[in-house]
């Protein structure tokens, strides 16, 4: 698209062939409501199913769609980072490709950035199975305890950022779960807002407690260390005395 977008929506996708068509349909219906130019960047995280072919076909009649293809499965943090670096919008939003985050929420949340630098979606009524809800509740409590935070749902992928929050940010593997804390550490403000959460549209979850709990705990210790060692100071340059004035 020749017109610079106001909003860039970044969506990591890994083996989501069952969801791609519905995802694009709903995004294409939801975002024009803003009345501002937008782009959608889907980051194919090394999919081995029909996701790449479906995305390539979809680009033909969707000028707002951009596709990045990772060389291998790098994980969500890598996919988000690649999308952030490619995004051209003044505002950058993120959701998951499984449609548990509703694209229709983005126009509703956008005005809430007035006075804040980041909006974090809080999945207050999770539409997951009971085990996953318990896992998430425990993970958030441990995350807040160890990182001295008050965020209810740091791992929610539904987020909106003013561009300056992400300019120059350096992510490490697993850091996408701690974006509100990382943004706060840069001196920016975060507002947490309850958002709708839906059952997965189709397919199966690619990440579960067994393959992420230990790594998430190690990542959390890294964030705790970063917060404890973060440099904070105020400084001002001393004005040079005017000509003829005593030093």
Image (cartoon, rainbow, N blue to C red):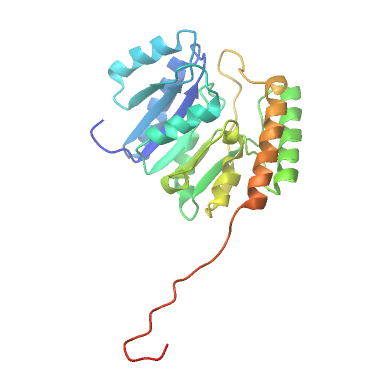
Residue sticking out furthest to the left: 2
Task: Give the residue drawn at x 64%, y 49%.
Answer: 227
Is the residue 179 above or below the residue 95 in the image? below
Residue 36 pos. (x, y %): 32, 40
Is the residue 10 above or below the residue 179 in the image? above
Residue 221 pos. (x, y %): 70, 39
- Which quarter of the rendered picture does the N terminus lie within? top left
> Quick one: 32 or 113, which is closer to the camera?
113
Q: Residue 90's quadrant in the figure?
A: top left
Task: Give the residue drawn at x 53%, y 55%.
Answer: 187
Q: Is residue 208 left or right of residue 89?
A: right
Taking the image as drawn, is residue 241 in sight? yes
Task: Give the residue drawn at x 58%, y 59%.
Answer: 232
> Quick one: 241 or 190, which is closer to the camera?
241
Q: Residue 246's quadrant in the figure?
A: bottom left
Residue sticking out furthest to the front: 247
Number of marks in picture: 0
- Which quarter of the rendered picture does the C terminus lie within? bottom left
Q: Is residue 43 left or right of residue 175?
A: left
Residue 99 pos. (x, y %): 53, 23
Taking the image as drawn, is residue 151 in sight? no
> Quick one: 215 or 155, which is closer to the camera?
215
Residue sticking out furthest to the top: 49
Residue 50 pos. (x, y %): 45, 8
């Amino acid at each position: 698209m020749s017109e610079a977008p106001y909003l860039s929506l970044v969506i990591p996708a890994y083996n989501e062939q069952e969801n791609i068509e519905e995802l694009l349909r709903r995004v294409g219906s939801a975002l024009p409501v803003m009345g501002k130019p937008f782009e959608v960047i889907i980051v194919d995280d090394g999919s081995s199913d029909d996701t790449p072919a479906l995305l390539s076909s979809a680009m033909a009649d969707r000028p707002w769609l951009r596709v990045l293809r990772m060389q291998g499965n790098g994980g969500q943090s890598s996919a988000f980072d690649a999308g952030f670096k490619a995004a051209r919008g003044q505002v950058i939003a993120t959701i998951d490709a499984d449609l548990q985050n509703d694209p229709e929420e983005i126009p509703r949340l956008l005005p809430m950035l007035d006075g804040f630098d980041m909006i974090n979606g809080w999945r207050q009524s999770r539409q997951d199975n009971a085990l996953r809800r318990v896992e998430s509740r425990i993970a958030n409590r441990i995350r807040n305890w160890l990182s001295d935070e008050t965020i209810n749902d740091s791992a929610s992928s539904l987020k909106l950022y003013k561009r300056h929050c992400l300019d120059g940010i350096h992510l490490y593997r697993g850091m996408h779960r701690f974006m509100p804390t990382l943004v706060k550490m840069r001196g920016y403000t975060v507002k947490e807002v309850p958002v709708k959460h839906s059952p997965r549209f189709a397919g199966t979850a690619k990440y579960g407690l067994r393959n992420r709990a230990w790594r998430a705990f190690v990542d959390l210790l890294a964030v705790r260390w970063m917060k404890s060692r973060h440099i904070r100071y105020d400084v001002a340059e001393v004005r040079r005395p005017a000509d003829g004035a005593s030093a």
